[in-house]
Image: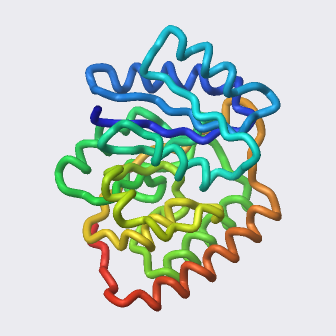
């Protein structure tokens, strides 16, 4: 199997079917599977995916009971994947699945890590963000780039793709408690070649954002820990884009 698309969920019952339908259209002709990793959602997201999977063997659900968190859900999904490549995509339909073939092409062409970005030519944000959210996003992006020396235009992206074998081999010490799993992967892998693919970030279709003050505090702690890890690495590797 060439590709597993992993989507971590919590209370996304209204979004999983539209997401799966979009992925089916975009990935038609490819050898793929869709793995929804659900944190035992009270709205029974996992049950909805099970129902869909009864008529489509390419759709699976991994129901996690007793543990919650986006980053550990992604790690669990990548470990359970059957595809040679693994992609992470949010279930809230803000990430555009249409660019997945282009991302897969970059991996085939030799990129070690492929990241979907809003902040390059061809990318953007649909609709208007208020001043607080726009300035906050820009500040966090610059802070992350400077703190970790990660040469990504959109280091806060939650939409990315890489080789499952590379993930398993080079991310053994990963801490899945952080807010942004991409940063954990980028710092641990230290990829020599990163590819970025532009996309337009879309408005959430249903449900509520998981962002909170507690989540942001966890991100600050994650950033401090990763900065220490980055600068104590024995053999720094400078990513090329």
> Dividing the picture into quarters, in which one does residue 15 lie?
top right
Q: Position of residue 155 (x, y in %)?
A: 50, 65
On the picture, is 21 further left or further right than 72? left
Q: Position of residue 68 (x, y in %)?
A: 72, 49
Say which of 139 and 151 sits in front.
Answer: 151
- Screen quadrant of the N terminus: top left
- Screen quadrant of the C terminus: bottom left
**At 60% across and 48% down in the image, what residue appears?**
73
Asked if residue 130 is positioned above or below residue 64 in the image, the reply reads: below
On the picture, is 173 further left or further right than 205? left
Say which of 46 and 203 sits in front.
Answer: 46
Asked if residue 55 is positioned above or below residue 134 in the image, the reply reads: above
Please give the count of numbered marks on the rendered protein.
0
**At 55% across and 75% down in the image, what residue appears?**
144
On the picture, is 126 further left or further right than 33? right
Q: Position of residue 225 (x, y in %)?
A: 60, 81
**At 37% across and 69% down in the image, what residue appears?**
189
Q: Position of residue 223 (x, y in %)?
A: 61, 77
The residue lying furthest to the left in this view is 109
Say which of 90 and 63 sits in front.
Answer: 63
**At 57% across and 21% down in the image, what residue appears?**
18
Q: How is the image coloured?
A: rainbow
């Amino acid at each position: 199997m060439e590709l597993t698309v992993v989507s971590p969920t919590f209370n996304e019952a209204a979004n999983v079917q539209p997401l799966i339908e979009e992925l089916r259209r975009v990935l038609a002709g490819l050898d793929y599977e869709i793995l929804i990793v659900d944190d035992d959602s009270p709205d029974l997201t996992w049950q909805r995916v099970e129902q869909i999977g009864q008529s489509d063997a390419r759709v699976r659900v991994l129901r996690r009971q007793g543990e919650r968190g986006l980053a550990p859900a992604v790690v669990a999904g990548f470990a359970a994947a059957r595809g040679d490549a693994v992609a992470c995509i949010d279930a809230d339909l803000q990430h555009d699945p249409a660019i997945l073939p282009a991302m897969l092409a970059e991996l085939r062409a030799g990129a070690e890590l492929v990241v979907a970005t809003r902040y390059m030519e061809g990318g953007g944000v649909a609709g208007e963000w208020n001043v607080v959210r726009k300035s906050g996003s820009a500040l966090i992006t610059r802070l992350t780039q400077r703190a970790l020396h990660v040469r990504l235009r959109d280091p806060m992206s939650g939409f990315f793709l890489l080789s499952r074998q590379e993930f398993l081999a080079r991310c053994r010490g990963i801490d899945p408690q952080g807010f942004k799993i991409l940063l954990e992967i980028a710092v641990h892998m230290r990829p020599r070649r990163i590819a970025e693919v532009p996309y337009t970030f879309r408005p959430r279709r249903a449900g509520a954002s998981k962002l909170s003050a507690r989540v942001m505090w966890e991100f600050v702690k994650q950033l401090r820990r990763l900065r220490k890890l980055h600068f104590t690495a024995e053999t720094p590797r400078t990513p090329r884009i």
